[in-house]
Image (cartoon, grey):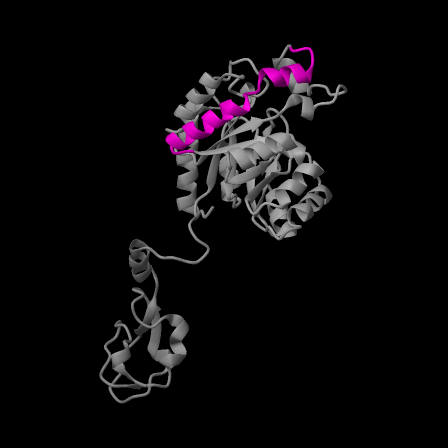
């Protein structure tokens, strides 16, 4: 997928609460915000969780299911429902993405839904079977790195690159729900870029959207933000998600930041060139310089405007012969001197 702008993903995750109707409503609302893609999650709980699995602390606060398997089942949509969502996203001109949490689900989103890229969630960064499957694909890869040290990231990316795929973007992520600002440590993005030589992005679990904007300023190529219709809905991720009613504002600010950041080469607007001509200084005759005399350094001074010889070019003037009388307080122009 060729892109020149920051790729913005609205992460729905389980915030559809197991309802196809709510999932379609979310897509419909997200389509009006200007994001590039909307992302869901797919898992067969029986394939993901052993009988020894347990809930994270944040999940216990927002869900009263007896087990994490029971909770996960409540928050899943079926394969056929994801097929419907994929088609609905296309209708709404959104890219449908989905993170898989087991090999069967991964196969389904790849072969049946033909997702354009693989987004590997932080929890699956060590899932060898899934990494090996993805490594054989030529599709682009977004790898979330929450909870992972550099050695784990190195091991996983080595597997992903095994068959020559270098289209990998590492997403910095802090896997807390919500993640407090003091824990975000966005400077890690620089370290990821330097160590692994991949593009970097940011998957955000913090409240508000200041962190996303800071990540864009740090050079993020991808921004993923969890979204919900209401923070008051029941479910583990709603409290740490951005309301879709605020998502359009985030997208607008990201696009504004892109304009502000611009390019890595120096560019000058017509307005700046005009100011340059006014504010810079040129080489000026300090006194009358008579025709056919050699110009001395003592004959010169520096004054505005900056449309003549720069003071840094004084060696181009000193020692040259004047072709005409140059009056005091006038610019030294090329046509006034003999080269």
Q: Give the range drawn in magenta.
A: 65-94
Q: Where is residue 66 in the image (x, y as percent from the top left)?
A: 69, 10
Q: Where is residue 259 in the image (x, y as percent from the top left)?
A: 39, 45
* Nearer to me, 98 or 15: 98
Q: How many marks?
A: 0
Q: Quadrant of residue 123?
A: top right
85 to the left or right of 281: right
* Nearer to me, 308 or 257: 257
Quadrant containing the C terminus in the rendered view: bottom left
Up the image or down, 73 lies above or below 146; here it is above
Which residue is found at the position 66% from the left and 37% from the top? 130
Q: Can residue 288 be seen in this view?
A: no
Q: Where is residue 179 in the image (x, y as percent from the top left)?
A: 61, 28
* Nearer to me, 47 or 309: 47
Q: Position of residue 205 (x, y in %)?
A: 57, 29
Which residue is found at the position 51% from the left and 33% from the top? 113
53 to the left or right of 107: right
Q: Does the magenta stretch include residue 75?
A: yes
Q: Is residue 302 magenta?
A: no
Q: Can residue 31 be seen in this view?
A: yes
114 to the left or right of 246: right
**Residue sticking out furthest to the bottom:** 292
* Nearer to me, 90 or 10: 90
């Amino acid at each position: 997928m060729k892109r020149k702008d920051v790729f913005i993903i609205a992460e729905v995750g389980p915030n559809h609460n197991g309802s196809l109707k709510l999932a379609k409503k979310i897509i419909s609302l997200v389509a009006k915000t200007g994001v590039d893609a909307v992302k869901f999650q797919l898992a067969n709980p029986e394939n993901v969780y052993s009988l020894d699995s347990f809930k994270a602390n944040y999940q216990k606060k927002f869900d009263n299911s007896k087990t994490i398997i029971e909770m996960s089942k409540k928050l899943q949509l079926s394969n056929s429902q994801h097929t419907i969502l994929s088609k609905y996203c296309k209708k709404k001109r959104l890219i449908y993405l989905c993170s898989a949490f087991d090999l069967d689900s991964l196969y389904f989103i790849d072969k049946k839904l033909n997702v354009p890229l693989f987004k590997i969630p932080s929890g699956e960064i060590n899932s060898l079977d899934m990494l090996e499957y993805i490594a054989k694909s030529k599709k682009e890869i977004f790898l979330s790195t929450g909870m992972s040290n550099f050695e784990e990231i190195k091991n996983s990316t080595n597997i992903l690159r095994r068959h020559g795929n270098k289209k990998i973007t590492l997403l910095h992520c802090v896997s807390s729900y919500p993640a407090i600002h003091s824990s975000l440590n966005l400077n890690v993005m620089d370290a990821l870029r330097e160590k692994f030589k991949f593009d970097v992005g940011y998957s955000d679990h913090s409240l508000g959207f200041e962190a996303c904007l800071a990540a864009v300023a740090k050079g993020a190529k991808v921004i993923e933000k969890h979204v919900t219709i209401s923070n008051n809905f029941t479910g583990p991720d709603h409290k740490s998600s951005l309301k879709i009613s605020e998502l359009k504002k985030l997208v607008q600010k990201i696009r504004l930041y892109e304009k502000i950041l611009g390019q890595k080469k120096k560019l000058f607007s017509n307005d700046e060139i005009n100011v340059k001509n006014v504010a810079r200084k040129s080489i000026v005759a300090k006194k009358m310089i008579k025709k056919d005399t050699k110009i001395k350094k003592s004959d010169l001074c520096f004054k505005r405007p900056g449309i003549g010889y720069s003071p840094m070019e004084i060696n181009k003037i000193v020692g040259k012969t004047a072709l005409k009388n140059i009056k005091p307080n006038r610019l030294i122009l090329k046509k006034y001197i003999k080269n």
